[in-house]
């Protein structure tokens, strides 16, 4: 810097000049170190934020994996429930054949089996026991023994071998933890999940904590609309027992070692409530952690999750180290050069010798700046760019003559140009440091994200001389932020919004309705008909192909303003902004026909698919977004009950579908 360095030439014998020179050396050193520390701290902070974002993303992945696995097992029980609903009595052989077709051991890890527990009033206990013994089980009896008003007994359990033989005849209703879950399922006509238990299937080898899922079976032909009717018509429960370690096998995916998970029964993470943990040692102080509650079937699990040190290795931590090492080296070199120049300058008596030394020092400074791994620029007090280092010129592919003045602005991304110019004007007035992110065109034509940091320059008299600054390429960091956002908001299979983000968009649309009472839109709930048959008959790979095929059909029919989300499994939802019901019905019918006419061609088969669609109206008079989803869901199930492959609209505030 010529103006700065010219003040460093000391006259021989002038102690004041020497003191001033030493002060400038210290100032340059302190400024360089502070700038280096600021850039290093910014990079470290960015790394910590990226680590936290990646940790939160992996936690969401794990929770969704556990929730999806539980949802899959609930569907198995729903299928068993349908088997009992379709028959006055399900025989043992029929039960065995149905379960065998599911291939539990190959497709559903962690599940011990699927069974049926029968309610047995006290007065028919003996006759029931005799009936089961006559079926070829002479040693059958209900246990534990003792007098009770009502008994239950596991009469069906498949696979009926190994550990499961120990559960035959067990009265689960006699044990308090299981009874609580069975009563919840019975009274609410829904899935009930038990607390932490030790399964009767356990032996002395590898004892694990366990839990059970229950779904009530009511007597066919009897009403069960309320709690009293359900208790009167209950026949028994289809249920599934799980060993927790077997259940959790493979949940974390390929990078399961990144997270340590502990599952506690209930909402208190105590040692007595611990069901599962894959963490051998306590987490370190540097580990990230979170606690989440998972509620299913009237019961709560507390999930305590900590990061493993290996999680940070997934991210690039080199940037802050490069900044720190380069900044310290650059500062030391700069201080050394200035010190060297000062020592030599003090020995010069003639102005010509001082000027020559000044030119040599400036050359060394420029050589050092040209070798720095960052883009460096200098602007004078008139906002006129006067110099750029070699790394800048190599990056832009332009010459120094093209860049000086205002020429460098030609490489700024057009939509960012106004922001950059306004920020420079503002900080030239304030004369304070600044930092801004924008895109700069590289020599190959690609616009790269950079972070530009500038600090003001002053001479020995405090006069403002302009700014000096440096730029770092942060494109990879920006791309990783965008990728994390996409993974957190979209469904990986179909590319549509996931359930959480779709509900956020629905809430935004609802808020828009509240601000403008005249607006209205339509909400569609869609469900692929007989999707479970496709999964069971052709395999899950074919099921995924059907979902992708269905997603492509939706994209071919939707408008750009329509919002599509996958709520789970084969269930989708669509928001049609500013669309009346009549228009929504036309859209839905067109979509339904397109699906029915577009069978999926597979190498081994042609899979016909149809869709049922329910429509509800979203307007300012609606109570909440959830109420609109429930209305659309009711309309959807009306379409299912009406024969499937049809469109049904639910009148606002009405219980009737049209």
Image: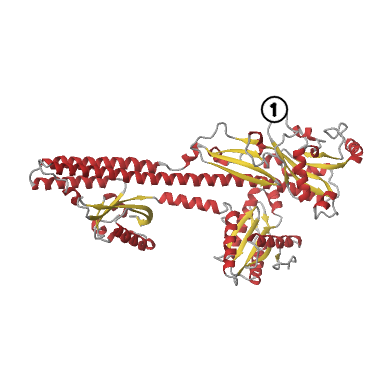
What residue sits 60% from the left and 72% below the top?
518
Tally the numbered discs.
1
Q: Is residue 7 visible?
A: yes
Q: Nearer the viewer, residue 111 or 142?
A: 142
Tell me the quarter of the picture where residue 368 sits.
Answer: top left
Give left or right: position of 261 versus 75: left
Residue 336 image offset from top left, x and y in percent: 22, 40
Tell me the quarter of the picture where residue 423 sits.
Answer: bottom left
- Label 1 sits on a secondary structure element that is loop
Residue 191's place in the image compared with 310, above or below, is: below
Give left or right: position of 391 versus 362: right
Q: Is residue 80 visible?
A: no
What residue sits 25% from the left and 44% below the top?
27
Residue 383 image offset from top left, x and y in percent: 26, 60
Give left or right: position of 357 versus 59: left
What residue sits 18% from the left and 52% below the top?
3
Residue at the top extreme, as displayed = 204
Residue 583's place in the image compared with 208, above or below, is: below
Scheme by which the image is coloured: secondary structure
Residue 198 image offset from top left, x and y in percent: 72, 34
Tell me the quarter of the picture where residue 147 sits.
Answer: top right
Residue 321's place in the image compared with 536, above or below, is: above
Residue 356 image offset from top left, x and y in percent: 12, 46
Which residue is the site of mark 1?
205
Quarter of the image with the C terminus in it: bottom right
Residue at the left extreme, as displayed = 350
Q: Residues within 10 Å of mark 1 (few under 14, many from 20)?
A: few
């Amino acid at each position: 810097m010529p103006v700065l360095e010219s003040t460093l030439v000391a006259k021989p014998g002038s102690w004041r000049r020497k003191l001033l020179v030493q002060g400038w050396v210290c100032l340059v050193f302190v400024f360089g170190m502070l700038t280096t520390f600021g850039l290093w701290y910014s990079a470290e902070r960015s790394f910590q934020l990226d680590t936290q974002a990646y940790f939160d993303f992996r936690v969401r992945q794990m929770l969704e994996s556990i929730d999806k696995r539980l949802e899959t097992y609930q569907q198995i029980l729903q299928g068993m429930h349908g088997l009992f609903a379709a028959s006055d009595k399900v025989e043992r052989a029929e039960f065995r054949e149905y379960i065998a077709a599911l291939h539990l051991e190959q497709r559903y890890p962690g599940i011990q089996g699927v069974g049926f527990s029968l309610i047995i009033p006290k007065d028919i206990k003996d006759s029931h026991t005799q009936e089961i013994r006559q079926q070829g089980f002479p040693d059958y009896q209900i246990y534990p023994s003792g007098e009770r008003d009502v008994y239950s007994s596991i009469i069906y359990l498949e696979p009926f071998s190994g550990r499961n033989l120990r559960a035959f005849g067990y009265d689960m209703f006699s044990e308090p933890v299981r009874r609580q879950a069975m009563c919840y399922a019975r009274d609410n006509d829904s899935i009930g999940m038990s607390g932490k238990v030790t399964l009767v299937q356990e032996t002395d080898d590898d004892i694990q904590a366990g839990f059970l899922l229950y779904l009530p079976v009511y007597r066919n032909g009897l009403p069960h609309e309320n709690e009293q009717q359900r208790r009167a018509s209950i026949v028994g429960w289809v249920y599934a027992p799980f060993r927790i370690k077997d259940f959790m096998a493979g949940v974390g995916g390929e990078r399961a070692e990144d997270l340590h998970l502990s599952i506690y029964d209930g909402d208190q993470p105590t040692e007595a409530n611990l069901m599962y943990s894959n963490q051998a040692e306590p987490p370190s102080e540097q580990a990230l952690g979170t606690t989440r509650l998972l509620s299913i079937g009237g019961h709560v699990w507390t999930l305590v999750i900590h990061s493993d040190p290996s999680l940070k290795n997934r991210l690039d931590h080199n940037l802050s180290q490069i900044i720190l090492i380069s900044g310290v080296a650059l500062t030391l070199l700069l201080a050394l050069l200035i010190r060297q120049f000062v020592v030599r300058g003090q020995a010069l008596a003639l102005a010509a010798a001082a000027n020559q030394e000044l030119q040599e020092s400036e050359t060394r400074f420029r050589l050092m700046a040209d070798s720095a791994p960052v883009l460096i620029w200098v602007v004078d007090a008139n906002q006129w760019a006067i110099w750029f280092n070699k790394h800048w010129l190599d990056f832009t592919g332009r010459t120094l003559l093209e860049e000086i003045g205002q020429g460098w602005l030609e490489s700024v991304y057009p939509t960012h140009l106004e922001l950059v110019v306004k920020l420079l004007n503002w900080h030239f007035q304030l004369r304070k440091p600044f930092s801004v992110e924008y895109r700069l065109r590289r020599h190959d034509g690609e616009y790269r994200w950079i972070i530009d940091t500038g600090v003001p320059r002053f001479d020995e008299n405090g006069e403002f001389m302009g700014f000096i600054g440096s730029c770092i390429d942060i494109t990879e960091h920006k791309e990783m932020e965008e990728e994390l956002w996409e993974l957190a908001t979209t469904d990986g299979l179909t590319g549509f919004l996931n359930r959480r983000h779709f509900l956020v968009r629905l809430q935004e649309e609802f808020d828009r309705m509240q601000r403008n009472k005249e607006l209205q839109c339509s909400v569609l709930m869609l469900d692929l008909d007989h999707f479970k048959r496709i999964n069971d008959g052709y395999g899950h790979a074919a099921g995924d192909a059907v979902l992708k095929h269905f997603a492509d059909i939706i994209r071919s029919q939707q408008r750009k303003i329509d919002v599509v989300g996958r709520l789970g499994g084969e269930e989708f939802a669509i928001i049609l902004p500013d669309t009346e019901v009549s228009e929504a019905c036309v859209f839905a019918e067109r979509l339904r026909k397109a699906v029915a006419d577009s069978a999926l061609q597979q190498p081994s088969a042609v899979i016909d698919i149809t869709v049922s669609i329910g429509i509800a109206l979203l307007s300012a008079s609606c109570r909440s977004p959830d109420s609109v989803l429930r209305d659309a869901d009711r309309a959807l199930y009306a379409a299912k009950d009406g024969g499937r492959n049809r469109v049904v609209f639910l009148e606002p505030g009405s219980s009737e579908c049209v």
